[in-house]
Image (tube, rainbow, N blue to C red):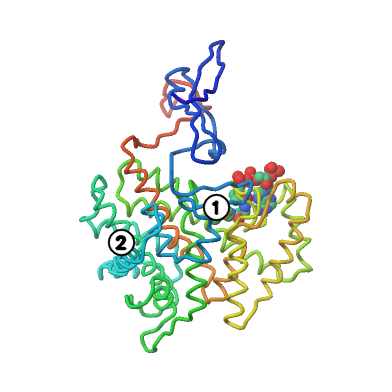
Amino acid sequence: MADKQAKLEIGGATHEFPVLEGSTGPDVIDIRKLYGATGAFTFDPGYKSTASCESALTYIDGQEGILLHRGYPIGQLAEHSSFMEVSYLLLNGELPNADELSTFEHTITNHTMLHEQLMTFYRGFRRDAHPMAIMCGVVGALSAFYHDSTDISDPEHRKISSHRLIAKMPTIAAMAYKYAVGQPFLYPDNSLSYTGNFLRMTFGVPAEEYEVHPAIEKAMDRIFILHADHEQNASTSTVRLAGSSGANPFACIAAGIACLWGPAHGGANEAALNMLQEIGTPDRIPHYIERAKDKNDPFRLMGFGHRVYKNYDPRATVMQQTLREVFEALKTTDPVFETALRLEEIALNDDYFKEKKLFPNVDFYSGIILSSIGFPTTMFTALFALARTVGWVAQWNEMISDPAQVIGRPRQLYTGPTQRDYVPVGQR
Ligand code: ACO
């Protein structure tokens, strides 16, 4: 029996529901028995007040701008850790020791190659296909190749398919890029780091030796860390919902990729850079700020605002810093960065954005970095999907491991016609 109870009065009767406490963060009212007890549902489209699951992976305090993975602040992980280490942490709950890390890295690099037959899938796409369309298709197709790891009730199968997904994502994303630019696919080089290997598969060509730029490798790895997991966001919830039916992990991750693609979610990094390029110069910013504030104009400041963060997104802080480091390493700059900084300053001092607590999110600066590294805008969301795969599989694993797990099946407030009789077509 929970210590705290919430009382609900409905139709003259009072019902009590347990209030559950997490290790930190808001309490939740456990309404699992609400329908049985009252015959009523709750109504919360967009899940603005609904905790859909119990999780020990990631914690966000949106008011304070805090993001923790297994308790560790994102700023510390971004500064001191590596994407492989964060992946291990998310999957296993604790940071690895040196041996555990090296074994994990070895396991992941052993799974980087794609089945040769899978590569023929790419040729079915038009050359101008969006990389996210290719990613959805190719990742979904993995389920047809790895039957030996799709028994989701077997923890070992779940582990192998999770490792496969994390390992193969860079190869799949790099090949999507290569296909678009008409260059030959490059096989993985397992002597390189996870991130170095990805950069080589993307930007290397068979005719030349590709040297991984250490500063770019570090920046890219950090970008991956910043995107690794983010609690119960839309794509993660999609993965969980797809997985709740017992679907195989490759199909679930393909569903997550499809959801991530939208401009209100992962697609915002592409949209943010497009917007900054359209704005062009700082003198044009006020016009776009006015448009963003105009209720009759669908335009929004992309890379601004967040469902959970009502403060500066801590990932945006690291992203801005990383951007400066990349510019320094490449001895370059981008006028778009000046526009972005000015836009941020103007928006943060504008009453509309202040009142609605709209701050830059992770996507505001990421596009500028990725573009300066050489990625076309269409690849931005594919990179997000690559990095988020570890979060998706960790969340999926957490859900499947829970003995109390049931299929996700929301209800509705029905407002359509009530029962009526069918009328033959000639009588309508
Ligand atoms: N520009 C202008 N106004 C905005 C913006 C924005 N970027 N974001 C929110 N608002 C306004 C809305 O018009 C709304 O105003 P109203 O209350 O007067 O109607 C209010 O702020 C609240 O916005 P909602 O859309 O209700 O907030 P919600 O939590 O549903 O949406 C979202 C969050 C989708 C991220 C939204 O802020 C947005 O569209 N931002 C731009 C897209 C973006 O950057 N997405 C990336 C999110 S981070 C990620 O997925 C990795």
- Residue 13, placed above or below residue 69: above
**Residue reaching furthest left?**
148
Report the mark closest to the observer, 1 or 2: 1
According to the image, label 1 marks what residue?
67
Crowdedness near tag 2: few (<14), some (14–19) or many (≥20) residues, C-alpha within 10 Å: many
Indicate the quadrant where residue 389 lies. Answer: bottom left
- N-terminal label among 1 and 2: 1
In-front residue for pair 143/166: 166
**Rendered residue at 36%/62% (across/down):** 97
Residue 402: name its quadrant. top left
Q: Quadrant of residue 337?
A: bottom right
In this view of the protein, which residue sits in the foreground, 230 or 78? 78
Q: How far across and down, in percent of the image, does residue 67 sit?
A: 55, 52
Above or below, comparing residue 155 to residue 42 in the picture = below
Q: In whole angstroms, how far apart are the C-alphas of marks 1 and 2?
A: 27 Å
Question: According to the image, label 2 marks what residue?
Answer: 164
- The mark total stands at 2
Would residue 403 be visible to someone looking at this image?
Answer: yes
Q: Position of residue 152 (x, y in %)?
A: 26, 47
Q: Amino acid at mark 1?
A: Leu
**What amino acid is at disc 2?**
Arg
User: In this orientation, which residue lies closer to the viewer: 83 or 53?
Assistant: 83
Q: Is residue 120 visible?
A: no
Q: Residue furthest bottom?
A: 208
Label 2 CB sits under 8 Å from any ligand 1 atom: no
Residue 141 position in % (x across, y down): 31, 59
Residue at 56 percent across and 64 percent down: it is 270
Residue plotted at (49% across, 38% down):
22
